[in-house]
Amino acid sequence: MNTSTEDTTETPTTETPTATSGHATSGQHATSGHTGSPFPFGPERGALRRPFSGRMLAGVAAGLAHYFGVDVTIVRIAFVVLTVVGGAGIPLYLAGLLLIPEEGSDHSIASSLIDSLQSRSR
């Protein structure tokens, strides 16, 4: 007599059908040429900006969180961890401050500085 408690029944596996046309079928999400990415791509994603609301310092973490669709606390913790572990958090935050434009503006601090330097040299 077999006293093994091991279950030998097989569970059926189901394969998900793939759409051969460019249209998504029910249960499938249409992506803009990117598969498997949790981040939205295409026109539905807004521009990366440093918002006026929700900022603690300069709005870099809030802007990145809004752009990638994650909680701002996660981005802030990532900056702190990067600062403590290798010291990269502060330079990355400063780079974001210089390169990410404020809400309502199309020019970052760095691009404004470059434009002013180029206009002086003319």
Image (cartoon, rainbow, N blue to C red):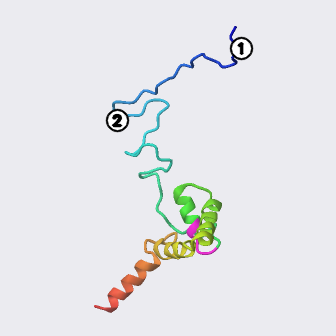
The residue carrying mark 2 is 22
- Residue type at mark 2 is Gly
Secondary structure, mark 2, is: loop
**Quick one: label 2 or label 1, which is nearer the N terminus?**
1
Give whichever of 50, 12 is nearer the camera. Answer: 12
Instruction: Point out the stretch of residues depicted in magenta.
Output: 57-61
Q: 10 Å neighbourhood of mark 1: few (<14), some, or many (≥20)?
A: few
> Which residue is at the front of the view, 23 or 93?
93
In which quadrant of the rendered view does residue 31 lie?
top left
Q: Which residue lies under the disc numbered 1?
A: 3
Name the kind of residue labelled 1 in the image: Thr
Identify which residue is drawn at 34% across, 35% down.
22
Element class at badge 1: loop
Mark number for residue 102?
none
Task: State how many labels appear.
Answer: 2
Expressed as whole percent of the image width and height from the top left, the position of residue 52 reads 59, 70
**Main SS of residues in magenta:** loop
- Residue at image position (34%, 92%) is 120
